[in-house]
Amino acid sequence: MDNTTAAYSQSPDRHDEGSPAEYRVPPHNIDAEQALLGAMLVNNESYDRVASFLDPAHFFDAVHGRIYEAAAKLITQGHLASPVTLKNFFERDAALAEIGGPQYLARLAGAATTIINAEEYGRTIYDLAIRRELITVGTDIHNRAFDAPVDDTPGAQILDAEQALYQLAEQGKYEGGFQSFHESLKVAIDMAAEAYKRDGGLSGISSGLRDLDHRLGGLQPSDLVILAGRPSMGKTALATNIAFSAAKAYKAEHHADGSVTAKDGAIVGFFSLEMSAEQLATRLLAEQSGVPSEKIRRGNIHEDEFHHLVDAARDLQSIPLYIDDTGGLTIGTLAARARRLKRQRGLGLLVIDYLQLLAGSGKFGDNRVQEVTQITTGLKALAKELNVPILALSQLSRQVENREDKRPQLSDLRESGSIEQDADVVMFVFREEYYVSRREPTEGTPEHLQWQEEMERVHGLAECIIGKQRHGPTGTVKLQFQADVTRFSDLDQVHTEDFE
């Protein structure tokens, strides 16, 4: 390496006269940048080893970034990138002229000894760039905390700092791209083996409902599951039942490397945007104790019922179910809190009640369809990122009420385009009893006798209609519903399922 290049390779760690003693140069490695560029100019195949994760902005030296960008442009267009072909790009580049002009390109190629380590050079450059970004984020947090206006609350600053760090963490992953079918096949076989060993033979998390599990195979990791229904159909009750069942069944498996995985069940995060945590707890208490929630709220309970409540409360205290009842969350805030829960406690299932109460992270004006599209896309991305199923509840439009058959369809979803598109599973809760009870005719008439017979036929029955499933069949699962304790359970009697 000649004097010009050698001098340029030195890290500018010395302080300028009069500069503060505490000034520190951000982390970088000029030698690694030169080595990678030299390897690329000698053999363009070196670019393929770093193209998936390395960008021009990752280079500490701006000139090196421009050289990398120009070389990448030629290579991706099928042309040769060499000191000769790159010369035209930099003949008038003042910054390059300061370190030798186009001749610097020739020196880079001449100093390259091997292309074997090209990927390692790229990873070094990348990691140092992430460290510099981390310094920038830290500086921004520091400066904002010092100079924040009165309306910029500490809570908002912490949330923005978390989001910035998590975005940086996602950037800091250069694994990815294509993988061999052999690797994918191994993952599929491992999943089947785990399902074989697990109680019930499920590949996903059990809903606690036998027939629903049979149809879905459990709630699958990275799936976005939409549970929709009209008001009073019991969608919150069903979601609560599923969340409790998963949390109650949770069994941890500790490994030699210190990691912990779920052998069964799941640690559950529940975002209750409509009901308070106390209301949700009352529902769970009613379900588990068998004491109606109305009696619990009024305190109108007998001594034996009180003992049932105490026993149920004791059991509920130990389950890994975490509730966030903050209203008006944005999708960005929800994602940040879910990531934090997984980091601090672990997470195997996320429940959101309900989707229409979320807000998008941005300004959409009156365009609610675009906002819901961002929300559903964000939830699906979050499910893949955290590798957990997300069960999101959704309201249905009023057009259901205008049909003779009130059973919901995919077209009944509010802003249905994005919800239906992004969801892996769409389920509807339907209780015919609710509609029949509202049609009660005058007592003592023949119609009233017919109505009573119809009420007896539908009493306590519910349907979970699977309208979409990427990995299996659609159809209807019949369930038992106890309204006083908001509990769904398997229908014990023999029944038929309506396959599509």
Image (cartoon, rainbow, N blue to C red):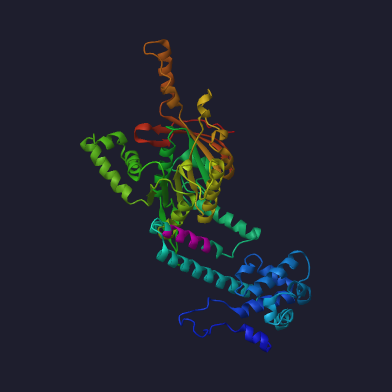
Asked which quadrant contains residue 437, the reply is: top left
Q: Is 38 left, or right, of 61 in this rendering? A: right
Q: Which quadrant would the N terminus be assigned to in this image? A: bottom right
The answer to whether 8 is drawn above or below residue 53 in the figure is below
Residue range corresponding to the magenta coloring: 157-168
Name the residue furthest front. 18
The answer to whether 486 is drawn above or below residue 82 in the figure is above
Depth check, front residue: 247 or 91: 91
- Name which residue lies at 62% across and 83% down: 9
Name the residue furthest top. 445
- Name which residue lies at 62% across and 66% down: 53
Task: State whether the magenta stretch is mostly helix, strand or loop.
Answer: helix
Asked which quadrant contains residue 303, the reply is: top left
Q: Please tell me how many numbered marks the rendered image carries.
A: 0
The answer to whether 221 is drawn above or below residue 79 in the figure is above
Q: Which quadrant would the C terminus be assigned to in this image? A: top right
Residue 475, x across and y down, in percent: 55, 35
Name the residue furthest bottom. 3
Residue 390, x across and y down, in percent: 49, 48
Residue 116 visible in the shown view: no
The answer to whether 436 is drawn above or below residue 8 in the figure is above
Depth check, front residue: 441 or 468: 441
- Name which residue lies at 41% across and 44% down: 273
Magenta-drawn stretch contains 382: no
Q: Is 453 left, or right, of 189 in this rendering? A: left
Q: Is 421 left, or right, of 201 in this rendering? A: right
